[in-house]
Image (cartoon, helix red, strand yellow):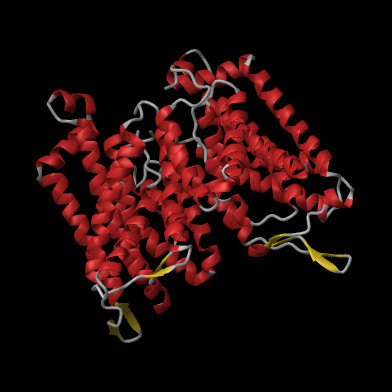
Amino acid sequence: MLDILQAISDGVLFGATYALIGIGFTLVFGVMHKLNLSYAAASVGGAYAGLLILKVLVGAAPWQVFLCAFAAGGVIGYLVYLLCFHFIPLANPLATLMSTVGMLLLIDEIIVHTTEGMPQNYPAMFDDVMLRAGEFTLRGDLLLVFAISVLAMILLLALLYRTKLGLATRAVSQQPVAAQLCGIRVGGVNAATFIVTGLLGGLAGAMIGASVGTLSPLLTTPLTVKGLIVTVIGGLGSIPGAIVAGLLVGGFENVLQLWRGVTERDLYVMLLLFAFLVFRPEGFFGRKAATD
Amino acid sequence: MDFYFGLAQLIGVHTLLGLSAYIVLLTGQVTLAQAGFFAVGAYVSAMLTVLAGWHLAPALGIGALAGAITACAVGFPALRVKGLMLVIATLAFGEGVRLFFFNFDYQVAKGGIKVGPLGGEGFRQIRFFPEHGWSTLEVMLFVWTCVVLAMALLWWFDRSRYGAVLRAVGEDEIAAQAVGVNLTAAKVSAFTIGGAIAGVGGGLYAHYTTHIEHSSFNILVATFAIAYPIVGGLRSVFGTLLAVIFVQGVLIEGLRFLGDWRNLLFGALIVLAMNVRPAGFLGGARRA
């Protein structure tokens, strides 16, 4: 019983990073009704870029690396917008889908090229701290990852519901044409969405690197799939949904890893997704007709 | 010369993969499940020739049938959702199939050595062509016979009532439904035919590479499958063929002299191609 509790708590703490990735997918979907398949790759790319500071500033503290990854994520997010969305007619959903796939491959290859395919060690904070309650333990670094992720989510919600940019973003996501008639620059809002999700992604990538301990280009595919699953289970376009689903998927997969081993784990996550598609295709918080 | 025959085999198999996504894309559905059907066809037909000692042709037929049945079974629940949700559902299905074969062991001792799929190690020794003395040229001709048959079938569909129904669904579902088109039948049948074509492609792939493993059927293969028709344009089946030749022949083989930089350029060129021709090489302005 304790094993299961331990697995669930570790999984839920790590699930916060899935939630961040899911938010990135869902936010772009909510605003532009587009899927940005390069998002998870961009997040990992941001995390890698965070390591660059170690080259300039020898012995940089982990928080400096995280901050650098956060900023780099924003830059990459803007570049993705410029290269994959800005010049492509938005009425054609296939074209942007394909251009983001091309971007995914490009980012992946840049990572492989610059690191020669070797996994890179990633710094973590409080990795020597362990909170204990009898047999039950909580890893300090995972707790920090969880806390930073929650903080990022709160900041994002504040940005969306307490600022002018957030108001404009929500207006564009509801009615792009009406928003434009009110004098909102839709292109600018779209670009801002990509920068904000990019910042979140860079942070998520850094958190994943910190909790796993290493970064490798092999992370991008599973992260893309997990992020998309989180998005669907939470309901497309729903931020609270992505948060709940991220934590749920994190806990679920860790329990199944305990029961069935790491090779079969993801198979059950796919089955969970299919269960949702069949019985509740709109996810936790999605609108009933949110199928497109 | 054998190198070029080998390249032609590769282009043929990838054309089948692209065509399997083409017919699904005609109905306006974006699918990332084709790698899954490709894997099912590959494993089923390879197990039939290696473990049961069948001839390749019937084994390919059963592989196609297995791909079609899987596609039909997935089609019904997956097509409850559409658009981007379907992309995600099919992506997850494709990964699910890959993970299934990652955990799939079924080995039989044959002549002192064990043959058959072995989880992460993959399925080795699919030696139908060498055992029966087929030369590279003969294999290539066999592959291209299948490709031409599949292309002819789809070309004929495009000119028939059925093709018009598929395109009507792809252009505007509500309008199509209003004139009495059965949306579920159109989508699931397109999905099933796509699954069969992918199954044949997978079977051919397994036999000419002689070794398959779960990572041969990853998301990259699934994205290639939809990339060909999208990059080539949905006007006709020849767009897909053109895109396969462009990607496999020009980008991957033609840029080999660039060494490591080739892979970098590959993603960048797809981004560029979509910026310049959002509706594909042979696409009209209408679908843009």
x 66%, y 35%: residue: B16
Q: At 72% from the left edge and 49% from the top edge, which residue is drawn?
A: B206
Taking the image as shown, residue A108 lies to the left or right of residue B189, namely: left
Q: Is residue B111 above or below residue B266?
A: below
Q: Residue at x 42, y 22 (%)?
A: B288
The answer to whether B230 appears left or right of A14 in the picture is right
Residue A237 visible from this viewpoint: no
Q: Nearer the viewer, residue B252 or B118?
A: B252
Q: Residue at x 47, y 60 (%)?
A: A218
Horizontal and vertical percent position of residue A174: 22, 32
Q: Quadrant of residue A114?
A: bottom left
Q: How many numbered badges does the structure rendering display? A: 0
Residue A81 at x, y percent in the picture: 30, 40
Quarter-of-image position of residue A132: bottom left
**Residue in the foreground of this view, choosing between B202 and A218:** A218
Quarter of the image where the N terminus of chain B is located = top right
Q: Nearer the viewer, residue A237 or A52?
A: A52
Q: Residue furthest front?
A: B257
Instruction: Tell me if A245 is positioned left or right of B245 in this view.
Output: left
Q: Is residue B284 above or below residue A103?
A: above
x and y percent of residue B85 in the render? 42, 39
Residue B77 appears in the picture as rendered: yes
Q: Position of residue B55 (x, y in %)?
A: 86, 45
